[in-house]
Image (cartoon, rainbow, N blue to C red):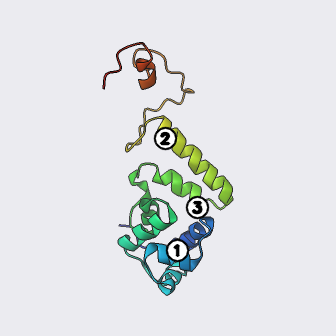
Amino acid sequence: MASLNVGNLGEFLREQRRTAQLSLRQLADAAGVSNPYLSQIERGLRKPSAEILQQLAKALRISAETLYVQAGILDERRGLDGVEVQTAILTDPSLNERQKQVLLQIYESFRKENGIAGDGADDSGASGGEEEGPGATHPHEAEADGGPHAT
């Protein structure tokens, strides 16, 4: 298991808190932790449990897995259903916060459009999406054929 990189986690949490436009006290209240404890986490002095990370993730409206990766609890290379991409975007110092949020929204919209729920789907076509043939029908197209719409 990867070692806990508390300093990196603290910086990441502070960045996410500022992006969410929350004060230290507001995030502490929303996550159910004390203000001094959260401050110590952000400064890299304390190692939060997975449960605390989950509460912080919920309050920040980000995935708990992202925080687990930042904390070193989960290995980033395990294929965490898009977490690697999200983490790469969120931790890229060359992007500003608006760019990060837009990229994340675009990424998620493509994943939803492609129906990717829990698998990495390595067979996604890189040819531009021009899929034709017997297996290329979409659920809405099949319904529009005039068939019965029984429930």
Identify the mark nearer the N-term, 1 or 3.
1
Q: Quadrant of the C terminus?
A: top left
Viewer-side residue, 140 vs 1 = 140
Query: Residue 92 placed where, x, y %?
Result: 62, 59
The residue that label 1 is drawn on is 27
Task: Say whether residue 12 is visible.
Answer: yes
| Residue 28 vertical placement versus 130 (above, below) | below
Task: Say whether residue 70 is visible.
Answer: no
Q: Quadrant of the N terminus?
A: bottom left
Using the numbered discs, state the Cα–Cα distance from disc 1 to disc 3 in whole angstroms.
20 Å
- Kindly indicate the quadrant of the structure image that contains residue 25: bottom right
Name the residue: 34% across, 16% down. Answer: 148
Query: Residue 126 placed where, x, y %?
Result: 53, 30
Viewer-side residue, 100 vs 121 = 100
Using the numbered discs, state the Cα–Cα distance from disc 1 to disc 2 in whole angstroms.
29 Å
Q: Are marks 1 and 3 in contact (CB under 8 Å)?
A: no
In the picture provided, is 45 more to the left or to the right than 118?
A: right
Name the residue: 42% across, 49% down. Answer: 81
Identify the mark nearer the N-term, 1 or 2.
1
Of all residues shown, which one is farthest toward the left? 151
Name the residue: 54% across, 26% down. Answer: 129
> For residue 111, which numbered disc appears in the image?
2
| Residue 85 vertical placement versus 5 (above, below) | above
